[in-house]
Structure formats: C-alpha cells, structure tokens
C-alpha cells in the first residue's frame, strides 16, 4: 500500500521489493527540503533601472485530463450506505487550523493513490495574485489531472474549477480574526521589530502586506477578495455570499471537532479518516486583555474578516442544529475517543522544534510538531510536516510518469 511507502520515505528505511512500481519509487525518495522562506517572492531593487529580461511565452496549456482512477478506494466503507467522495478542493487559509485538515487530505491521497495539485518546487502555490488555471501547467503532475487541492494558494473559484473535476467538493476553514492575526503576527516573528501594542497604536494601522502576502483581513485575502474592497462592506458581503455558493462546507477552527464530523459526513468517510493532530500550532500564543486598546483597534481594523467569520460561525451552528445536537455530541465523543486511541497506540507526543527531525519539523522556530514514538509506519503519517508530504506526493507523480 502507498502509506507504507510514505512512511518508508519519512523514516528512511530500506523498503522491501514490492510489485507496485509507485511504492518502490516512494520508498527510494530522499528528503532534503528547507522551506521556511520558499514561498516569499524576491523583490527587485527599488531604484533599479535595469531592463527587465525578456519573458518567454508560456506554451498553451491543454485542458486537464480526467484524474486517474483511484486505487483501493472502496465503493462503500463498512457501516456506511453512501459512496465516498475523494475529489476535494480545499482552500488552506493561513493560521486557522488548516494544517490539520491538510494532513487529513494528504493521508487520504496516500491511502488511495490520489494525485494532489502540487507546486513544481517548494510546498505552496501561494503568490500575490489569485490562482490561474494556467498555473496548473507549471505544477508537478499536471498531465494526470488531480483529485485534490490542499496546498496554500489565493483562491479564484472560476479558475480553480477549470483544473478540478465537475464533482469536486469545495471546503475551507475560518478562525476568529483577531486570534488568526495574532497567531500570524507571532509566527512571522514581527514582534522582533515592533510590539503588537505599538503596531496597533499607529494611525492608521498600516495595511501593507508582509512579504506582499500576509496581513490585514488575511482570510478574505486568501479567498481572493481584492485589497481595495476590504473597506467596502457591500463588496465584503458579496464575497461572503459567493463563498457560501461555491463551498459546500466552511469549517470553523474554534469548533474543529464538530467541523470534522460534518466533513466526514459530507464526504462519506469513516471516523478514523478525520482524526488529526493540532499541527503547526504556536508554542506561546499572544494574548491581549479584553479591555486592551490594541485589541479594540485591531478588531476594527479586521472588520472585513469579522463579517466573514460571523457568517460562517453562524452557518456552522445552523448545520449542527440540523445535524442534531445530541447526535453531534455522540459523534464528537466518538471522534475524540478514536483520536485518543491513535495517540496512545502511536505514542504521539507534542514537541518543540529542537526535539524534532527535518521531516516532522514545521517552518519557523515558534511552532510545535509531533513525534510518533512507537515507530509504526502508519503513525508517521499523522505527524509528518507539510514539506515532507509535498515531497512524497511529488515522488508519487514521478513514479506515475515512469509508468505512463
């Protein structure tokens, strides 16, 4: 099975000869990535007068083919009467608990030999502009079509639809905007240059995006809302309504367990498929007192993201009521019990970066990772970092090229 190849790659074990060529390719892959700054664009000198180099026209990008038929995906999972969904477009918003959902989707891809949309280099498709369908031709494995999108990018639904199958399920996740911004501020280590209180005391608070990609109303920016519309409530509400139309489920970080239960029912998966760790979480989150002037100023500054969050937090509450509150409590209890079982069986422990290896260490010096101490191959899949998964999936694509 592919998951054995994934963990063989992660642990650098010699993998026994296997009849399936893809597994062999994965088992011999090497791991040598350092992706802390791989997504930040290089800026030209401000006063540079050098002529811009001539750009070579990109060849026409043919329409994406139908994705390969997934291997070992059952027609029905035991105990379920519906057919599982495996084509998923996930908008990975920043610092919102999205790494846990990303891991769920990578595990699905590994178990059933699904092809994600992958960057040709690095671990993200993120840029200053929204995703374009033509970007697919610069991605690894574009000639096979794809089943899943789960790496960071700026969303343009019309463009994404052009590279995904018609029966794709679209999902995303939001987080309370002030918590999301505080997490991003600390993760980017901006407090090394200015305190949060000093930043929030500026009038106006600067809206320049750090690295051209991170800043005010980050979640709506990830959803593709142009910067000039962030102060226009009508444009914001139009965008929220558009997201409501296009996304079958928007998870809420503050209610992750309920969100994962709804996700598993939407996709018709067993509970074990949505078990996840709290990956890429800050070791020491920033807290602001309730009566802090900085807190009030930042909440006003993040008004657009607050409108987005209120809508989908309310929408999730509505979905929970429709699902049945007693039924939801039972399902959440079952998910937590399954998570405890995995943690105990795999001996999973949360660790600071200094105690991790490259394959399960996340970029940055302020976030936790996890280790699975029992050495189980399957257990490694729960704790592998994003850049490891992307490399493993890239090796899968290379193996498919060799086959075809």
Image: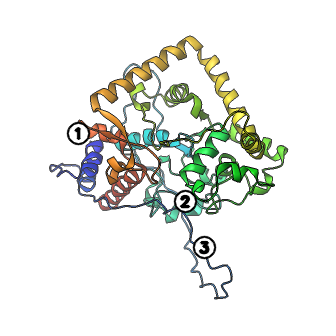
Compute the Cα span from label 2 to label 3: 32 Å
Query: On the picture, is 348 further left or further right than 115?
Result: left
Q: Residue 254's x, y, as percent?
A: 58, 31
Q: Nearer the viewer, residue 175 or 311?
A: 175
The quarter in which the C terminus is drawn is bottom left
For label 2, the residue is 63
The answer to whether residue 189 is above or below residue 137 is: above
Tell me if residue 269 comes above or below residue 140 in the rendering: above
Q: Which mark is residue 375?
A: 1
* Secondary structure at numbered mark 3: loop
Mark 2 neighbour class, 10 Å CA radius: few under 14, some 14 to 19, many 20 or more: some
Residue drawn 57% across the image and 34% down it: 253
Residue 135 in sight: yes
Crowding at mark 3 (Cα within 10 Å: few <14, some 14-19, many 20+): few
CA distance for labels 1 and 2: 43 Å
Do residues under tags 1 and 2 come within 8 Å of each other at their CB atoms?
no
> Which image quadrant is residue 1 in?
top left
Tag 3 and tag 1, C-beta contact below 8 Å: no
List x then y, in percent, for residue 195: 64, 52
- Badge 1 or badge 2: first in the primary sequence: 2
Q: Could you say whether the residue bearing mark 1 is in a helix, strand or loop?
A: loop
The residue sitting at 48% across, 18% down in the picture is 331
Q: By what rule are the colours in the image chosen? A: rainbow
Asked whether 6 or 212 is in front, the reply is 212
Q: Please tell me in which quadrant of the rendered image residue 293 appears.
A: top right
Residue placed under numbered mark 3 in the picture? 43
Sequence-earlier tag: 2 or 3:
3
Task: Assess whether mark 3 and mark 2 are in contact (beta carbons under 8 angstroms).
Answer: no
Judging from the image, what secondary structure is the residue with disc 2 in? loop
The answer to which of 294 and 178 lies nearer the viewer is 294
């Amino acid at each position: 099975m592919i998951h054995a190849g994934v963990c063989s790659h992660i642990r650098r074990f010699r993998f026994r000869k296997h009849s399936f060529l893809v597994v062999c390719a994965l088992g011999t892959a090497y791991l040598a990535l350092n992706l802390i700054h791989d997504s930040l664009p290089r800026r030209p000198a401000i006063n540079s007068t050098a002529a811009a180099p001539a750009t070579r026209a990109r060849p026409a990008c043919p329409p994406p083919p139908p994705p390969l038929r997934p291997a070992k995906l059952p027609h029905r999972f035991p105990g379920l009467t519906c057919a599982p969904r495996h084509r998923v477009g996930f908008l990975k918003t920043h610092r919102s608990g999205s790494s846990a959902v990303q891991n769920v989707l990578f595990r699905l891809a590994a178990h059933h030999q699904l092809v994600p949309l992958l960057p040709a280099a690095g671990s993200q498709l993120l840029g200053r502009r929204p995703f374009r369908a033509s970007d697919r031709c610069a991605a690894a494995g574009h000639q096979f079509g794809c089943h899943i999108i789960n790496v960071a990018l700026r969303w343009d639904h019309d463009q994404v639809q052009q590279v995904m199958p018609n029966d794709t399920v679209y999902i995303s996740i939001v987080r309370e905007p002030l918590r999301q911004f505080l997490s991003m501020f600390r993760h980017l280590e901006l407090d090394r240059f200015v305190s949060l209180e000093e930043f929030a005391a500026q009038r106006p608070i600067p809206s320049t995006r750090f690295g051209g990609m991170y800043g005010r109303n980050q979640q709506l920016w990830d959803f593709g809302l142009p910067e000039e519309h962030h102060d226009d409530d009508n444009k914001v509400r139009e965008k929220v309504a558009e997201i409501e139309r296009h996304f079958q489920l928007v998870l809420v970080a503050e209610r992750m367990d309920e969100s994962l239960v709804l996700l598993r029912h939407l996709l018709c998966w067993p509970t074990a498929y949505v078990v996840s760790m709290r990956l890429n979480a800050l070791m020491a989150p920033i807290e602001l007192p309730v009566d802090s002037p900085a807190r009030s100023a930042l909440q006003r500054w993040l008004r657009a993201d607050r409108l987005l969050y209120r809508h989908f937090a309310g929408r999730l509450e509505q979905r929970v009521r429709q699902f049945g509150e007693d039924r939801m409590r039972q399902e959440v209890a079952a998910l937590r019990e399954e998570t405890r079982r995995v943690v105990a069986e795999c001996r999973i422990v949360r660790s600071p970066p200094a105690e991790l290896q490259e394959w399960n260490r996340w970029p940055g010096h302020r976030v936790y990772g996890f280790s699975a101490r029992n050495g189980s191959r399957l257990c490694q899949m729960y704790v592998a970092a994003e850049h490891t998964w992307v490399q493993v999936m890239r090796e899968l694509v290379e193996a498919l090229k060799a086959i075809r």
